[in-house]
Image (cartoon, rainbow, N blue to C red):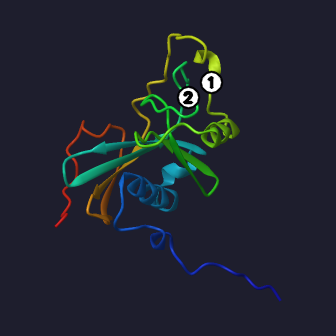
């Protein structure tokens, strides 16, 4: 006789209504892993946060195609917009993003290294950085009401936030 134990809680139980931009990121990641076929394309994803207006926050998730290239300024305890400061592992996948209120930590570097996401050729000097530009690469943009993060709309797109009209949200 086999007994299968499982959780009755859904991923929506992990999502929170009131919080900051990092809570919106977590909500987007939970939804992305459970609802998006794009989550199966890779084990590593970049996250970008955009304040659309005073009521709406956008969280974009896209496959991390290029490795991160830290420069001499990206050291433990510092924060620069060209390098992530936060991460979340969810169901064997890594999601990373920049948060200006946080700093690069040894644990972050360790996790990025575990997923083979750091190219250290740029650490000691500035070199020309050549990134991949794949305009057909699709991602998922989440548009959240800032005052209720459970109110959101998801858009699968190959365009960046700001290059198309965001969906209408009733944030009242």
- Residue under the point 27% across and 58% down: 146
Left or right, residue 99 beside residue 146: right
Q: Residue 170 or 137: which is nearer the viewer?
A: 170
Q: Residues within 10 Å of mark 1 (few under 14, many from 20)?
A: few
Quadrant of residue 43 in the image? top right
Q: Residues within 10 Å of mark 2 (few under 14, many from 20)?
A: some
Residue at the disc numbered 2: 68
Q: Position of residue 98 (x, y in %)?
A: 44, 39
Quadrant of residue 100 in the image? top left
Indicate the secondary structure of the residue bearing disc 1: loop
Quadrant of residue 136 in the image? top left
Q: Position of residue 91 (x, y in %)?
A: 61, 58
Calculate the distance from the C-alpha at mark 1 to the C-alpha at mark 2.
Answer: 6 Å
Q: In the displayed orientation, state which residue is furthest to the front.
A: 77
Left or right, residue 154 beside residue 110: left
Indicate the secondary structure of the residue bearing disc 2: loop
**55 vs 118: above or below:** below
Badge number at residue 111:
none
For the residues bearing labels 1 and 2, Cβ distance under 8 angstroms: yes
Residue at the disc numbered 1: 119
**4 vs 82: above or below:** below
**Quadrant of the drawing holding the N terminus:** bottom right
- Residue under the point 19% across and 44% down: 165
Q: Residue 66 or 72: which is nearer the viewer?
A: 72
**167 vs 163: above or below:** below
**17 vs 164: above or below:** below
């Amino acid at each position: 006789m086999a007994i299968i134990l499982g959780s009755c809680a859904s991923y929506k139980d992990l999502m929170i209504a009131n919080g900051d931009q990092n809570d919106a990121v977590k909500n987007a990641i939970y939804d992305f892993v459970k609802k998006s076929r794009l989550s199966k394309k890779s084990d590593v994803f970049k996250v970008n946060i955009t304040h659309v207006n005073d009521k709406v926050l956008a969280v974009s998730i896209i496959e991390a195609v290029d490795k991160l290239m830290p420069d001499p300024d990206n050291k433990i305890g510092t924060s620069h917009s060209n390098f992530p400061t936060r991460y979340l592992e969810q169901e064997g996948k890594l999601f990373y993003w920049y948060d200006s209120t946080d700093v690069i930590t040894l644990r972050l570097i360790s996790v990025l290294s575990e997923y083979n996401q750091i190219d250290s050729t740029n650490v000691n000097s500035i070199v020309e950085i050549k990134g991949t530009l794949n305009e057909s690469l699709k991602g998922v943009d989440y548009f959240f009401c800032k005052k209720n993060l459970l109110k959101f709309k998801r858009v699968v797109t190959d365009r960046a936030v700001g290059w198309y009209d965001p969906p209408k949200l009733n944030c009242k």
